[in-house]
Amino acid sequence: MKNLENVQGDERDVILISIGYGKIDGAYLPMNFGPLNREGGERRLNVLITRARRRCVVYCNFVGADLDLRRSKARGVGALKTFLEYAETGNLDIPRVTGREADSPFEEAVAARLRTLDFDVDHQVGSAGFFIDLAVRDPSRPGRYVLGIECDGATYHSARSARDRDRLRQQVLEGLGWKIHRIWSTDWFRNPDVELGKVEVAVRMAEVAAARRAAADTAPGPVPGAVTTAKPLDAVKPLDAVKPLEREPEPEVEVAPPTCPYRVAQPRLGRLWAPLHETPPGTLAKWIAQVVEVESPVHLDEVTLRIRTAAGVGRSGSRIRAQMGLGARVGANQRLYRIDARNFLWRLDHEAVEVRRRDGDIPPSLRKPDTIAPEEVGAALVHAVQVSYGIAPGDAVQEAVRLFGFKRAGRNIVERFRRVLDGLVRDGAVVRERELLQLPGGSG
């Protein structure tokens, strides 16, 4: 018999490991494991568990799930937990508290409600390279989790690709022993109390299943292989199969984004009899109408760009801009189109506003936020709120920016979109419920 200090260099077919530390009176487990708590303790443990050629047999009065790593930062203790979990289950993946903040106010709201029920909840728990939104600890063995909760909230979109990705992710986690409960944002925001009740039932059932497994794990049995709590791995029962939900979640109605490609007008001017700044306003009004017919709503600066490009003029001087403004007002008086206070020109029959994507081969000026009509920005923001059933303002802006086809959201774009969003809230087109935005009445 040798201790951890002098096992170096030994090698045997079978190594019997007896952990001399354990629970006091079968209940409280101090997190003191002697040399493992000190610097380099993980290396000493590695030496010990690699001495066996064929098999390790481990004796102790606790299991890896009893080790709560919140009570010890020693790497040796973490390594012991991983080893015991592996000896018991054959699984090397140990869920880790990452310290990451919640992904959304929705996730924070769910966690807060669960804590009112005295559940011990961690955010963004890492497992198998994934991050589980919320994980509920086992009250009897706080070193393990009984349930993982996925919140399809602020940044979740109803695209089929996202759902397929989540299904594959859930299959991987369930294969590692996780029991997953999914909260659909649609259901939560429509009736949070009902959904909270479902989560509570899922947690209670998971606790009961964990207690049954713990009772089975302590039953006596033969000792043919690696063991924890003086019990062989062969006698360890597999984790209970994850029970399916009582009902499949109602599929969310996919709302098609109100987007289309941006069409750039190519006005036909005919023969020019005078420079643009001397062209009669009535003639300019007819040319402007050609651009408005294709690009409504369109800013006067963009209309000026189209016409001077068609005329072969290199730049817009002050005289050209003044004459174009005069022509625009003449056309509006003739009811060829209408012009609003922000110098956006509209077809008279223009009603529903579409979000036109600013990607592809279009003039760079169209990507400037000031050339996008607020109504068009508003349509993108309303869509972002509609499909999310509750979304943080910053996420709504990011989703609206994405609808326009912008590769990145610069400061000017974000500020412009945020001002439009504030206006929607003031006008009641979008309502704020705590930290999230919804459509009036919670409608989708």
Image: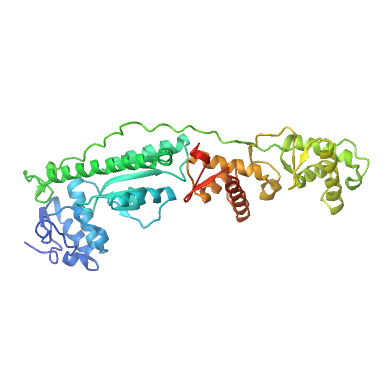
Residue 67, quarter of picture: bottom left
Q: From the viewer's perspective, is residue 2 above or below residue 249?
A: below
Q: Tell whether 191 sits left or right of 290.
A: left
The residue shown at (15%, 59%) is 28
Residue 377, quarter of picture: top right
Task: Measuring from the top left, give residue 188's x and y in whole percent.
Answer: 40, 41
Mark yes or no: residue 366 visible.
yes
Q: From the viewer's perspective, is residue 46 above or below residue 187?
A: below
The residue lying furthest to the bottom in this view is 39
The residue shown at (58%, 42%) is 429
Choose between 164 and 374: the one closer to the eye.
Answer: 374
Q: Tell whether 155 sits left or right of 335.
A: left
Count of marks, rendered view: 0
Q: From the viewer's perspective, is residue 245 above or below residue 411?
A: above
Task: Measuring from the top left, give residue 85's x and y in whole percent.
Answer: 21, 50
> How did the renderer colour the structure?
rainbow
Choose between 177 and 297: the one closer to the eye.
Answer: 297
Task: Measuring from the top left, give residue 5's x and y in whole percent.
Answer: 14, 67
The residue shown at (35%, 56%) is 98
Q: Tell whether 387 sits left or right of 1.
A: right
Task: Measuring from the top left, give residue 400's x and y in whole percent.
Answer: 57, 44
Choose between 425 and 353: the one closer to the eye.
Answer: 425
Mark yes or no: residue 131 visible.
no
